[in-house]
Amino acid sequence: MTAVEDVKSLVDIVDLVSSYVPLTKSGKNFKANCPFHQEKTPSFFVFPERGTWRCFGACASGGDIFSFIQKIDNTSFVDVLRKLAKETGVSLGYSTDKSDEAEKARIQKLHLILDAAADYFHRILMYSPAGEEARNYLSGRGISEDTIDRFKIGLAPKGWEILKKHLIGLGNKENEISDVGLTVSRAEGQEGSYDRFRDRLMFPITNVEGNIIGFGARSLDGSQPKYMNSPQNKIFDKSASLYGIDRAKESLESGEPLVLVEGYMDVIQAHQSGFTNVVAIMGTSLTGKQLDLAKKYTKKYVLALDSDAAGAEATRRSLEGAWDLFNSEIIRLRGVSTPVNVKREIPDIKIANLGTGKDPDEVIRDDSESWRSIVLEAQPLLDYLISWEVDQQGSLDSESKLAIVERIFPLIGRLDNPFEQEAAFSKLARSLGETEKTLEIAAGRPPSKNRRASPRRTAAEDNKGVTFIEGDPTEDHLLGIVLVYGEKAWDLWESLDIPALPSECFRNPENAELWKIMTSGQPVEEAEAIVSGLAEQLRSKLVMKLDEKKLGRALGDMVKRLLERQIKSQEEEAALAISSSLEEDGVANLVPPEDIRQQFVNRIEQLRKLERSRWGRPLSGT
């Protein structure tokens, strides 16, 4: 992920906005009086699931976390990015001032504190009489001393302040020890802190560079919770981490899939047995941030969840969550055109069937060759989900079949490839013991979603001669063309009467900032470092093969697409705001507030005008 995406993933928009404006729950969303203009009736909404905000009142503005702070603090995008990056511990990849260097030194100090804690835990486990029980436990699980050393497994002592006093004795400050989650503040009214981890087996969690960023801790006496993790802090985010990724990344170069398991012991047992392509998601659900981390090293994945992890329903939700993540990534990649000689790598996710009541650790200990076979025979995710649903029903009477259809049809409908949809529909029919015709008569066809333009049309018709590898295709295409063709592009823009494009239409905050600079007349070279670097990247992606006719067509089509996307997005937000009001008031026939309803009507009219427009196509016969 980029620094901007990292920051957005770590900042909760509700927490951010509520620090400036008092928010009130409205259904699944939140509302308030708009902070940008005077009003008596709340028209300002925050949408947590979308990560956006919008005012349906006088100012009619909206955006994300960056645009909100820019507007309310009257500051620049780069200043907001610096501020939020500093608060979340995200590196911007370049140094801007002495404060950045100080921050790097501070992060390094936090890593050193965690290293010292890991060393201390490890020594207690290996050389202290207090560690005997834990050593016996690990030995009973088949873990060798060499493996304990390699993974630096340790034991937290039983005392309440033993680790804290040890680390302070090494010259560390109490607030720094707290910053990495090793201590907990005492109850309100009491001073000081105490050790977070006590009498637990400790597993250091490392980032891709091998630096310790946190700990996983397992109780040995049956106390709850069974597993604890370091809290989220400046250098640790469990949802963005994969246990063992630093050790697994090298083995992926040989083409092996990345095997995703749940627990620390699963990874440790696998690596000890030579299966070094295994990492843990540290829970039952794979997250988008973990996928972003994993896809830097491979496009092939096998998900091996404990079969009895949290019950059938929880496992199914986890599998459907993984399906949504991978399917979204596939759709995104299919929407990005690539050079003719470059192979598009589509992610491949499969599910390993571990059998009843077993986890990877147990399978490997019983028979490591069996584990190898299980991974090799893993099923495609959707095939596995279909088989899963059939197995869960037990008997296949008519009601059971309809229940399965209700679960699976939405998943098939999310596929963006019609051939894959047909194959999945056929697979479902066979699994239910029905013909496709019978299934279609009984339950219809899976619902289809609106498709984006196919890669073939995007490359051959809309943007012929323009080739990109990653990013938001339409935004990148437009920016790249204007950057490369300069005055020629602007002259065509004016002569073709293409309407102005607000920066709000760019979803990537960096793209939006670059567009502001370009349309304000400022030389791009004078922009901040991060935006200048983006400009050069966009220039380098463009293949310059556009004559005047194609250039005008490309400009018009892309502006139309961005405007249409923005209008639809605002229409969706208006619908969400209305839905929130309905849910909040519990009145099915509630008339939406006039300002929201009017904007809703306006968006629909704008969409109709866009459908009729022909910007960029002024010449007959084109």
Image: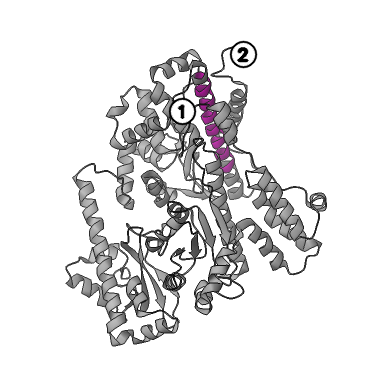
What amino acid type should be assigned to the residue bearing mark 2? Gly
Query: Count the marks: how many?
Result: 2
In the rendered view, does 470 fall on the left or right side of 148? Answer: right
Residue 155, picture quadrant: bottom left
Amino acid type assigned to the residue bearing label 1 in the image? Leu
Residue at x-position 16% and y-position 68% = 171
| Range covered by the magenta-colored residues | 552-576
Ranked by sequence position, the earlier of labels 1 and 2 is: 1
**Measuring 57% from the left and 17% from the top, which residue is drawn there?**
617
Secondary structure character of the magenta stretch overall:
helix
Residue drawn at (60%, 64%) of the image: 377
- In the figure, 246 relative to 269: above or below? above
**Which of the pair 594/520 is nearer the observer?**
520
* Label 1 SS: helix
Which quadrant would residue 428 be assigned to in this image?
bottom right
Q: Is residue 224 left or right of residue 206?
A: right
Question: Which numbered disc covers residue 478?
Answer: 1
Q: Is residue 228 left or right of residue 524?
A: right
Q: Position of residue 505 (x, y in %)?
A: 47, 32
Tell me: residue 373, above or below residue 66. Answer: below
The image shows residue 400, relative to residue 119, as above or below, that is above
